[in-house]
Amino acid sequence: MSATSATLPARRMAGWAITALPWILLAILAALPLLVPSPNFTRLLFMTFLWTTTSIAWNLLGGFAGQVSFGFAVFYGAGAYTTALLMNAGVNPLFAFLAAGLTAALVSLIVGLPAFRLRGPYFAIATIGISEAVRVVMTNLSFTGGASGYRILEHRPFRQLEHYYTALLLAAIAFAISWKIAHSKFGLGLKAIRQDEDAAADLGVNPYTYKLAAHALAAALTGMAGGVFARYAAFIHPSGVFGFHTSVHILLMPVIGGIGTVWGPVLGGFVFGIVEEEIVASFPEIHLLLYGLLLIVIILFEPGGILGGLRKLVRRFRDHR
Amino acid sequence: MTLIDFTNLLVSALLLAGIYAVMSVGMTVIYGVMKIVNLAHAGFMMLGAYFALELFQRFRIDPIIAALLAFPVLFFLGAAVHWVLVRRLPRSDEPTLPSLLLMFGLWLVLQNLGYLIWGNTDRSIFTPRTLSVVNLGPISISTVRLAVFIAAVGCLLLLEVILHYTWFGRSVRALIQNRYAALLTGVYEDRTAGIAFGLGIGFAGLAGGLLGSLYSFDPDFGRPFLIRAFVIIVLGGLESISGVAIGALVLALVETFSILFVPAGYQLAISFGLLALALIVLPGGIASLLAKVRRVA
């Protein structure tokens, strides 16, 4: 009796903590560059926010709806190039980012309209083909500089904090969208599609439009992240933003963190962002090898990712008490 | 375009189709038996190419023979991979997310092991045969392509014989047709799947070795061919061995004749366009179309 009365307030506390956690995290991250004024540290966090945004975005489609895509670099690159072209035409960066999201969403429709007529594996296969084809086209396209890349000329002084807060805001928006979807009818529909597409269709969920919507939303977020990156980097080239490794990174983060959850991609994004930005500098030749091994280990031993592992640990701890 | 040009293109398309079929057939066998889309196929093709290169450079073994030798080596490697990794995946009647991600991780590992061992410079296998040509009247055929084609078709015929006249082949076909019914009749799934996986990987290695004689390669070599293999098995209806042959022929014809209209750099975009078209118009592959025609007739 006393045990249940003790756990009830404890549970309510935990519920509050989970609701408050994003806000606390946001406040800490907003204050961090002011407390630790190091350009390197700020850059690391900036990149981590962008990676986290794409991770959350991938999870909307790959995690919630179970549609694995190996082609998110297409959206990242489309966003990056849209922003670059518009900014050089004199458009305000904010509008350029929004346009990047819009372009990426449009591209996602072009990809999704044929590809989602097919189920799971076909879609995944098609995305590899699309990203490959797009990279080839972008490498040969002359008005964006082709393989030699494209430079953004911004006639304003470079302020790192402005970039930092843009990326933080974007990541926060992505998280809010993911949170909202996870607790909505739309999110339930996506989860139903992941579990059994036919059953979902029988229950009145249209898998085709649901997948298209999730894809477009994920693409828009990824595209905006690409745009914010392009403005920061001021130079982009096809084998970078459209590169296959970009797609690999975007897919890895949610898998590492915990696929199909709200917090997993965030966790994965942070772990990956920090590890990637630090490791790439020291071991560029083996980092993809490590990621491959990590992927194998996670799939075979802990398909729930870091979050799944943590949950298991907590459960074990609770049972032993 | 003269008739001779046309015949030349037709012949080169046919020769290309042979190697395309070998490169895709392994994927079909693995997909059919295990419903796993083998994304690591590209990695094993790369291994096959480097295997042939090493044998050729170190021991002066003819590259075509080296490619044939890659088959048994990669067969055992594949069976080992199945035993260590693939066997642990949850069984399913359709491709699962974990299986896609596992094979993808394996591909990354193989590809980057390749970078560690061989570096990222382009390699190629160059023999006196590479530049020689057989002339049949006005039609000229590259000798190495002809040799590759003969090796490819020979291996495909061997596979057909194995699948049709051995107990292992019957088990494979039974598993492809209906897994539960196959289990009921006493097919030992684990062993059959292991051998089938080895067979699929063996064919990937063989294809890689043969392709190594035709093109230059680096550790990332398999990716464009992986996409082509997807196109082919989708055209072929995913599970049918004869479908693969038809799919390979269609892709080879489209690619070869498209050179007349679009720059070669865009060839991959054409493969993809064909994939999209096949997926939309013919989700069951060409084989289902033929079956439909046969039913009507």
Image (cartoon, helix red, strand yellow):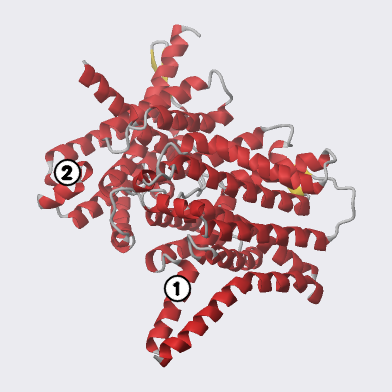
**Which residue is at a point 42% across and 66% down the rendered structure image?**
A297
Q: Of circles 1 and 2, which is in front?
A: 1
**Which residue is at a point 68% across and 52% down the rendered structure image?**
A225
How many angstroms separate mark 1 from mark 2 (CA)?
A: 39 Å
Tell me, for residue A235, which label it has, or none.
none
**Which residue is at a point 29% across and 28% down the rendered structure image?**
B287
Residue B227's place in the image compared with A44, above or below, is: above
Q: Which residue is mark 2?
A: B174
Horizontal and vertical percent position of residue B195: 23, 52
Q: Nearer the viewer, residue A300 or A311?
A: A311
Q: Secondary structure at mark 2?
A: helix
What's the residue type where badge 1 is placed? Answer: Gly
Respond whether the residues carrying marks 1 and 2 are from the same subunit. no
Q: Nearer the viewer, residue B148 or B271?
A: B271
Tell me the crowding category of disc 1: few under 14, some 14 to 19, or many 20 or more residues within 10 angstroms, Cα based.
Answer: some
What's the residue type where badge 2 is placed? Answer: Ala
Q: Nearer the viewer, residue B1 or A257?
A: A257
Residue A175's place in the image compared with A11, above or below, is: above
**Which residue is at a point 26% across and 23% down the rendered structure image?**
B292
Horizontal side of A16 relative to B99 (left or right) equals right
Horizontal side of A246 relative to B112 (left or right) equals right
Horizontal and vertical percent position of residue A12: 53, 79
Image quarter of residue B144: top left
Which part of the image, by quadrant, shows the C terminus of chain A? bottom left
Q: Chain of mark 1?
A: A
Q: Which residue is mark 1?
A: A309
Tell me the crowding category of disc 2: few under 14, some 14 to 19, or many 20 or more residues within 10 angstroms, Cα based.
Answer: some
Q: Secondary structure at mark 1?
A: helix
